[in-house]
Image (spheres, helix red, strand yellow):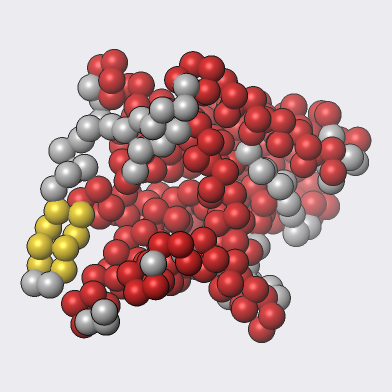
Amino acid sequence: MFSFELLINAIVIGILLGGFYAAISLGLQVSFGLLDVVNIAHPAFIILGSYIAYMMGKWIGLDPILTGLLFMPVFFGLGMLVYRIYYESFEKRGAEALRGLAFFFGVLFIVEVALIIVYGVDYRSVDAIYVGPKIEIGVLDLPLRMLVPFVVSMTMAIALILYLSKTFTGRAIKAVAQDRLALQLMAADPVKIKQLAFGISLATTAMAGALLIIILPVEPSVGRLYIGQVFAIVVLAGLGSISGTVYAAIILGVAESFVQTFFGPSWSPAVSFGILLLVLGVRPAGLFGR
């Protein structure tokens, strides 16, 4: 039944959900939107980040967000390694299209199977002081397990936007897919720039995985549920638009929350693709693309 209270809560929860969607999509916007590297394995690395947060919480009681922050450099190094393998095996030989896509499918499969072998298919969750409580403001119920990830996600998005726009390396990352020759004339190595950028894209998955397991329990194959969503958000925003990714994620989050509240959760999986098809029919470059 429709009510003003339900509507307000649906919108606010949708905004918080959109903040989380931004966190899981930022890295893909860097790799796919800026580098044109179709990293299908992106959600698998997010789940890996979730399991690391789970392990560190279980072993030494470390807060999941702090775990995500501490492991971002580790994932950065992993991303640089993965891109170097990808470059030497496919991109350097001009075979990055179909074979490169198969490579990332293989990486996704390896990560998922490794997690299943070690942890099985049971759902895992974490404990933190903000997982259970909520804040009540009038008719609003704000669960801290969604409010805290929203704040962390927005902080990460702002930091990434500032890095890409205010530093030489950041501007080089934005330019590498647009004018490779001009970048070389500026004494910058396009391959090293792309390797650095891919490392950044994977570094975001460490934090995104920690935020995911705060919001809901995970199991190794959960990442598959987000493949369509993250690509839909990136394309909806417009390839290469980091700030647009945040806006597109919030639009999707509000739309999903509204549909779940008033029409039932069974309709929510169709929301992202429905919005994507609608926008692409009107504006093929995405909402914030050039």
The x and y percentages for residue 58 are 28, 20
Position of 270 compared to 156: left or right? right
Position of 216 compared to 208: left or right? left
Q: In front here: 138 or 283?
A: 138
Identify the residue shown where x is 28% and y is 24%: 57
Q: In front here: 105 or 202?
A: 105
If the image is split into quadrants, where does the N terminus sit?
Answer: bottom left
The x and y percentages for residue 74 are 49, 26
Position of 35 compared to 206: left or right? right
Residue 290 seen from this side:
no
User: Where is residue 89, by image quadrant?
Assistant: top right
The x and y percentages for residue 174 are 64, 55
The x and y percentages for residue 142 are 19, 60
Please tell me whether residue 20 is drawn above or below residue 121 in the rendered image: below
Q: In front here: 228 or 165?
A: 228
If the image is split into quadrants, where does the C terminus sit?
Answer: bottom right
Identify the residue shown where x is 32% and y is 60%: 16
Identify the residue shown where x is 84% and y is 46%: 97
Position of 150 compared to 174: left or right? left
Residue 103 seen from this side:
yes
